[in-house]
Image: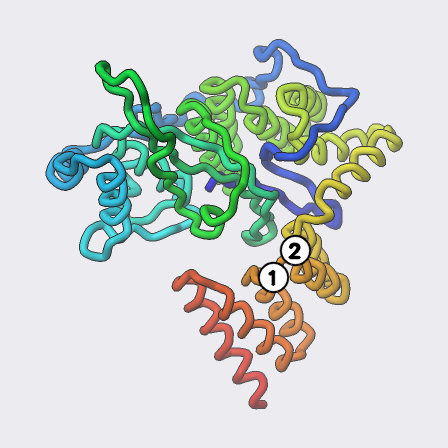
Amino acid sequence: MVIYLRKLKNITAVFLLLLNGCQNGLEIDDALLVNIDDLYLDKQFPTYKSHIIETAEDIFLLDEKMRLMVKNKLKPIYDPRMRSMKLLKHIFDKENIALAYDSGANVSAREAYHNQQANCLSLTIMAYSLAKEANLNIEFQEVSIPEYWVRDGDNNMLSGHVNLRITKIIKPNQLLLIGGNILTIDFDPVISKKSFPSKVISKNTVIAMYYSNKGGQALFDNELDKAYAYFKAATKIDPSFSPAWGNLGVLYRKVKHDNFAMNNYRHAIALDNKNYNTMSNMSIILNEQGKLEQVKRIKKILHKKRYQNPYYHALLADEAFYRGNNTQALSHYRRAIMLAHNVHEFHFGMAKVYYTMKDHKRAEKALKKAINYNKNKVIDNRYIAKMSIIKKANSH
């Protein structure tokens, strides 16, 4: 999973980091490709070069133990599909590394393997490296999922998604390749069951995503020079990756260089006119510049694009709850549940609001639904712990 961020500042919602959309693009008057050397602001971040950025080799490298595992357990299996399934079993089987998901673990292939924790992007990177070592023909894919936000403190994280496609290898003496994909490896079981559009992306794009995640964490930690180092590295490794330029724009906005921020937003949108979060960022500056008609047009089209996305309504609910408007929060959560009733986070959101309102019976009912729809044991334990708190409140 590729994580980008959205932060609240007072009552105005401000997007921090950015993600490509998947619907039809918008025509933005200010979109403009510029000389990329004019988009950097090195002097503002004087110590950025002191931060060591992982190289592509660092991110994907296997150590001797990992190579030995591949040699002994995977390479002896002749059939590529069976070899792929054996790899997946090794990753998750309790008798092997039993790797667990951690949204904050943006780590290298080696770190994921030995620490036994990784986010979806790092899981995918690790699986890619092991599969390549096992002589499997493998490619990265970006999956066009609906925009999806998850809160972390006073920040909203916007998630993208990548998976892996394993295909048959054409041997030199093989004139015809029969069949296409052998297997798609996706570490999100919900997404893997749905037919979202996907496209093959380069290894450099994946590295840019990895750097963006690292930069985002640094930005959260207020390590601005480090954030700049990673964001700049992302634009260098893949200059066509639109979100990376938007990330720089967000950082410039934070240090009050709005002109540079605007230039980066223009460049990002020129690269991809479906980059809706960059448009949201741009509309904030346009609003401050008094360009209200353009702001109105952008907001209207963005709302239209997102209205059928349940996660958009959950985002609005979360922001209303953050501002203390419980009635509005409940209204948005109900809309989200009407669009997708089986998403456990929506019911947990309802429970959270009801609990704040001291309506403990409804909070318990909503939390039971969240537990029923959740399929993650770690989250289940958290919900059960919260359920005991609500039950105690109900008993008084």
User: In the displayed structure, would residue 130 be above or below residue 245?
Assistant: below
Left or right of 234 in this view: 29: right
Amino acid carrying label 1: it is Phe
Would residue 223 be seen by someone viewing this image from the given angle?
no
Task: Provide residue 164's location: percent of width, then percent of height.
Answer: 38, 35
Tag 2 or tag 1, which sits nearer the N-term?
Answer: 2
Name the image quarter holding the C terminus: bottom right
Task: Provide residue 367's location: percent of width, then percent of height.
Answer: 55, 72
Left or right of 292 in this view: 224: left
| Residue on which disc 2 sits | 314
Would residue 155 be seen by someone viewing this image from the given angle?
yes
User: In the displayed structure, would residue 177 be above or below residue 126?
Assistant: above
**Which secondary structure, mark 1?**
helix
Task: Provide residue 183's location: percent of width, then percent of height.
Answer: 35, 38
Name of the residue lying farthest toward the bottom: 396
Residue nearest the observer in this picture, 375 or 170: 170
User: In the displayed structure, would residue 326 be above or below residue 133?
Assistant: below
| Residue on which disc 1 sits | 346
| Residue 117 - label | none
Q: Which residue appears at 79% of the width and 34% of the height?
A: 298
Q: Residues within 10 Å of mark 1 (few under 14, many from 20)?
A: many
Q: Which residue appears at 73% of the width and 48% of the height?
A: 307
Which color mode does the image show?
Answer: rainbow
Residue nearest the observer in this picture, 78 or 94: 78
Amino acid carrying label 2: it is Ala
**Which secondary structure, mark 2?**
helix
Q: Which residue appears at 60% of the width and 72% of the height?
A: 366
Q: CA distance from mark 1 to mark 2?
A: 7 Å
Left or right of 306 in this view: 187: left
Q: Which residue appears at 71% of the width and 59% of the height?
A: 335
Q: Are marks 1 and 2 in contact (CB under 8 Å)?
A: yes
Task: Provide residue 340's location: percent of width, then percent of height.
Answer: 62, 58
